[in-house]
Image: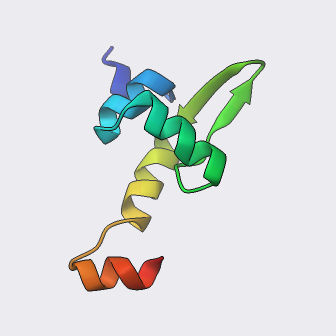
């Protein structure tokens, strides 16, 4: 089973899917601009469905549209 088929992704898998560093993902989690996440003890996991929703909500057709969304 490919890691993308699992219901939860690790920080590393999520960062790779978003093409960002784990550190960038951590910063976005701290400031609330990243995808929703789940905590299991000290482990941070991302639901695949939440990641897909996050990407859909942050899809734009122009830079002007993206700027207005801030």
**Residue 30, placed above or below residue 54:** above
Quarter holding residue 24: top left
Whether residue 6 is visible: no
Residue sticking out furthest to the top: 1
**Residue at the (44%, 79%) spot, across then down:** 69
**Residue 2, placed above or below residue 15:** above
Residue 62: where, in percent of width, then height?
Answer: 21, 80
Describe residue 39's horizontal placement relative to residue 5 as left or right.
Answer: right
Quadrant of the image containing the N terminus = top left
**Residue at the (55%, 42%) spot, across then down:** 27
Residue 63: where, in percent of width, then height?
Answer: 24, 78
68 vs 59, nearest the viewer: 68
Quarter holding residue 59: bottom left
Residue 46: where, in percent of width, then height?
Answer: 55, 35
**Residue 69, placed above or below residue 22:** below
Whether residue 33 is visible: yes
Describe residue 61's horizontal placement relative to residue 1 as left or right.
Answer: left
């Amino acid at each position: 089973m490919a890691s993308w088929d699992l219901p939860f992704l690790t920080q590393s898998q999520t960062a790779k899917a978003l093409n960002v560093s784990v550190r960038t993902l951590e910063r976005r989690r701290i400031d609330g601009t990243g995808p929703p996440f789940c905590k299991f003890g000290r482990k941070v996991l991302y639901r695949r469905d939440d990641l897909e929703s996050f990407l859909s909500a942050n899809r734009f057709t122009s830079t002007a549209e993206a700027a207005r969304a801030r």
